[in-house]
Image: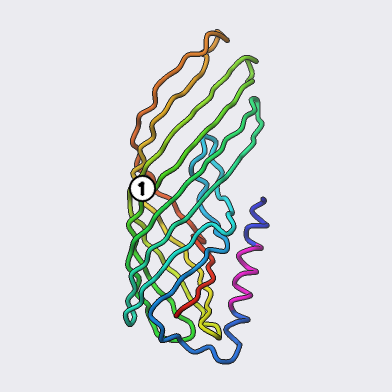
Amino acid sequence: MSRQKHLLLILLSFSIAWHCLGQENTTPSAEKNEVYLTVFSFRSGYGYLDELDYVVSFFNGVGYKRHIGNHAIRLGLGYKNDHYNWRYEAYGTESYREGKFNLGYQFNLMDKSVQPYVAADLLYLVAKYKSESMGGWWGDWYSMQNLDQHGIGFGTALGIKFILPKSFSIAFEGNIEFLWIHSKGTTIRNEYPNPSPRNTYPVDTVDFTTFSNPLQSFSLNYTF
């Protein structure tokens, strides 16, 4: 999906939000419990050997929030399942599956029909990455990688929530994530200028990474 289409999705979502803001009965909810579904997200394309700048995912998260006045405890699960084909001098495929858990704190800056908020989360990541590529300018180059990944870290978020009638609301949230990711697995490749044999190398690394997600989630929420 092109960057222009990504921006169009975001602009369309904001236009929906402002339309909803103009409806009647947009009073803040007094209920304490909130569940949400992430309809789509526009996030950093990490997880790729040949990294995409950003990727769009749909219906990729669920969560729960317990509100106490302007404060809230939040718990969520996000999912990512991406497949990427590429072709340059060589060609290949990459796949990345991820489950990410967050537990955090949220503070609503005002108790109105429009509620900006800030949040901080502890993060835990479980992921599986696989890539295979071949070709290249010397013809017989080959590489395959299989990695299991686990990560811990934290994120800071800024969001805005729009109250709708009948206990529904929508919310936009962007964040910055800081993660220490442990990757373990194998790389199989041949070495120039010899097309064979293909040698296997262990991978066992820990990397610190920072990711910026302009739209971590556009969510549909229900309070009760």
Residue 58 shown in magenta? no
User: Looking at numbered disc 1 in the image, what kind of residue is underneath it?
Assistant: Leu
Q: Is residue 11 left or right of residue 68?
A: right
Write down the residue under mark 1.
179
Q: Nearer the viewer, residue 29 or 192?
A: 29
Please identify the quadrant where the C terminus is shown: bottom left
Image position of 31 (left or right of 3): left
Which residues are the magenta region?
8-17
- Residue 221, horizontal then vertical, whole percent: 50, 73
Pick the residue in front: 145 or 136.
145
Q: Is the residue 27 above or below the residue 214 in the image? A: below
Front residue of this view, candidates 206 and 53: 206
Q: Residue at x 42, y 35 (%)?
A: 148
Task: State the predominant SS element of the stretch in magenta.
Answer: helix
Give the x, y percent position of residue 160. 47, 74
Q: Is residue 16 magenta?
A: yes
* Picture coordinates of residue 80, whole percent (x, y): 52, 49
Please indicate whether residue 20 sits to the left or right of residue 98 in the image: right
At a point 65% along the width and 15% down the height, the residue shown is: 139
